[in-house]
Amino acid sequence: MGLIKYTVDSFQNFAARVGLGAGSQNDQSSYGFNFTSRDRLKLEAMYRSSWVVGQVVDVVAEDMTREGITIQGFEDPTHAKVIQTTLDNLEIWDKISDTIKWGRLYGGALAVMLIDGQNVSTPLNVKTIGKDQFKGLMVLDRWMVQPTLEDLVTEYGPDYGKPKYYDVFQDAAGLCGQRVHYSRVIRIDGVNLPYWQAMTENLWGQSVIERLEDRLTVFDSATMGAGQLVYKAHLRTYKVKGLRDIIATGGRAFEGLVKQINHIRLWQSNEGLTLMDAEDEFETHSYTFSGLDTILLQFGQQISGATQIPLVRLFGQSPAGLNSTGESDLSNYYDNINQQQERRLRTPLHKLLEIVSLSVLGKPLPDNFEFEFTSLWQMSDEQKSNVAEKTTSAILKAEEQGVISRHTALKELRQTSSVTGVFTTITDNEIDDAENDPPPPDSENDDESLRSETDAADGDRVQPSAT
């Protein structure tokens, strides 16, 4: 039988006290709860007084709603325009942005869909939406409502296990004292929590600030400390022989010393002259700030990494380094924003657009309806020009080959104008007039006509006599 050796999963050196559990100070390190999400006043104080907290909360919410959506699937392009106009007139994107903001700040928020003439405590039946009944959204954060923790959704689906109703407090911004059914709200949580932790937060999420509090404290402390050093950037010392005796004796000698120092401060300027005793010494000391910028940058990068917001967007800081433009950082960030849009907004937005369509158009969305979140990445003028040239060439080529009509070509050109910036002046009248264009010639019929004409021409010719 060989010698049995016991090993541990991590590296340890007990002689050097290296490794977890080897007796070093690191053994006492641990993690604890700070439950900042429950302290509403503290979160509000941080949001109002710290611009970093304001950026962390606002930037993601505003970027998720900044460019809106692109709607497709309507046979009549004006229907999509009507829906977009309604979203703008009712400030839907602003309300959704506020919902995301307060969800990130407090850990959860609701946007109640306001349907005129319907009781908010009843389940929403989209088919009952009548003309002009949708009036917009009402934003309520987690501190304005009390979820019914004893009455949860039992129907299988994405809302299974969530509160069935939300009771609005009397001092809320609106719908005071009313009970709202879960089917009438768009709910946005901050950071999703595991089950038992969600139970401690009344089934809400966690504020995005809770994870950042220690890093924010370090960053602000370093920033304020660096600011305090500015006052000590230029120190001056004045050596006086027998200073202790002069101070201890007092009287005219001490008064004369104070008067001398005041005169030095008064006359010391760019063109001034400092007078002092031959045995006195005057020195200046300058403080160096080397290394502080690197420390502040490292603390800022920790906040940037924790929030998944690049420095160029979070702090407005220009990228550093050779050939660094920040485009890759923004590209990754925009991908993350799109991921959050797809995860948190697609399902509730589809339901909201169905309600808007029934309210303003009087009919449900078409079967082939779809929408995409407009990309945050903005093309340069040169890129737009290249895209416009290629898109226009493809559309015109399809028209020339008879694949599409001029009517369809004009609609396609105007549809791409939002991206390319050209063909924005194509009017509805021009599109309607193109619909009356004669159909393109049938190539097969043209070939038969051409053959008939050729045969007729050959029959008119004088045939040679047979030998």
Image (cartoon, rainbow, N blue to C red):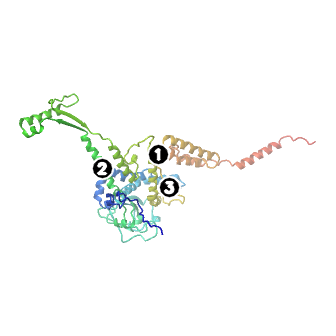
Instruction: Say few, some or many: other residues with alpha carbon within 10 Å of mark 2 (under 14 / 14 to 19 / 20 or more).
Output: some
* Residue at 53% over, 53% down: 76
Residue 423 appears in view: yes
Q: Residue 387's spot in the image, x, y percent?
A: 54, 44
User: For the residue labelled by badge 2, is the local secondary structure a helix, a strand or a loop?
Assistant: helix
Amino acid residing under circle 3: Phe
Image quarter hosting the C terminus: top right
Instruction: Say few, some or many: other residues with alpha carbon within 10 Å of mark 3 (under 14 / 14 to 19 / 20 or more).
Output: some
Q: According to the image, label 2 marks what residue?
A: 220
Q: Residue 406's spot in the image, x, y percent?
A: 60, 47
In the image, residue 343 sits, relative to residue 391, either above or below, namely below
Dots 3, 1 in contact, CB < 8 A: no
* Residue with the most extreme right position: 467
In the drawing, does residue 126 fall left or right of residue 109? Answer: right
Q: According to the image, label 1 marks what residue?
A: 378
Q: According to the image, label 3 marks what residue?
A: 371
Query: Earlier along the polypeptide chain: callout 2 or callout 3?
Result: 2
* Residue at 53% over, 48% down: 415
Dots 1, 2 in contact, CB < 8 A: no
The residue closer to the viewer here, 123 or 241, is: 241
**Which mark's residue is nearer the viewer, 2 or 3?**
2
The residue closer to the viewer here, 227 or 62, is: 227
Query: Earlier along the polypeptide chain: callout 1 or callout 2?
Result: 2
Q: Residue 203's spot in the image, x, y percent?
A: 37, 66
Which label is found at residue 392?
none
In the image, residue 5 sits, relative to residue 341, either above or below, namely below
